[in-house]
Image (tube, grey):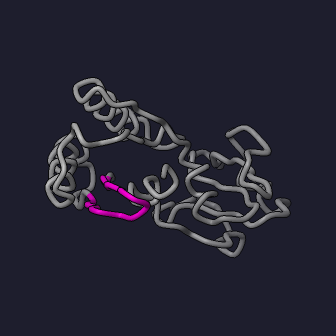
Amino acid sequence: SGSAAIYAGGRLLAFQEISEKGAQAKQLVAIIEQVLSQAKIGYAELERIVCTIGPGGFTGIRIALATARAIGFTANKPVRGASTLATLAYEFGEPCMCILPAGKGMVYAQQFGVELQAISEAALFPIAELSSVNVPIITAAVSDIHGLDEKLIAKKLELNASLLGKMAI
């Protein structure tokens, strides 16, 4: 549903998740304020703001991007976007195909190579064709992909601001 994290000097200073499902719009700014307080820093001390740009749920991404842009504008800090699929690949650390549910028998998928460079564009991919993929398939731990044989998944990773922050260092 959402989270916020602060990294400095290559280490995680603060992290907080929104616990209530569907409460991102209501709680995101409060969560950001909490991590700033835990890290004992203010908006002016941030170097940059990083936010996922999808694929994923439209409303959640829209809320996160609008909030990130507002903070960046107000604090005069750069805002960077990171692909959700690239974030999963970064955490896995090896060549893989990263997937997220898209509904209607499809997943969002993108393949990453040896240096974690994108080999393909993020695109819709039929679930039925995942059995022909010859690299590990990675998804988010919260992904519930209907019609997918779970044995095809090499690993499910936690996808949150802590992971995104680690990648953005």
Query: Main SS of the magenta segment?
Result: strand
Please give left or right for residue 80 compared with residue 91 in the image.
left
For residue 133, above or below residue 74:
below
Magenta stretch encompasses residue 15: yes
Q: Nearer the viewer, residue 92 or 23?
A: 92
Which residue ends up furthest to the bottom in the rendered image? Answer: 151
Say which quarter of the image contains residue 133.
Answer: bottom right
Which residue ends up furthest to the front in the rendered image? Answer: 9
Q: Residue at x 30, y 52 (%)?
A: 4
Please give left or right for residue 15 compared with residue 83 in the image.
left
For residue 112, above or below residue 154:
above
Horizontal and vertical percent for residue 22?
26, 49
Horizontal and vertical percent for residue 115?
75, 55
For residue 23, above or below residue 89:
above
Q: Which residue is drawn at 43% across and 35% down?
A: 58
Q: Provide the residue span drawn in magenta.
A: 3-17
Horizontal and vertical percent for residue 16?
25, 60
Horizontal and vertical percent for residue 8?
35, 56
Say which quarter of the image contains residue 68.
Answer: top left
Q: Residue at x 76, y 58 (%)?
A: 130
Q: Which residue is drawn at 27% across and 55% down?
A: 21
Magenta stretch encompasses residue 20: no
Labels in figure, total = 0
Q: Nearer the viewer, residue 89 or 48?
A: 48
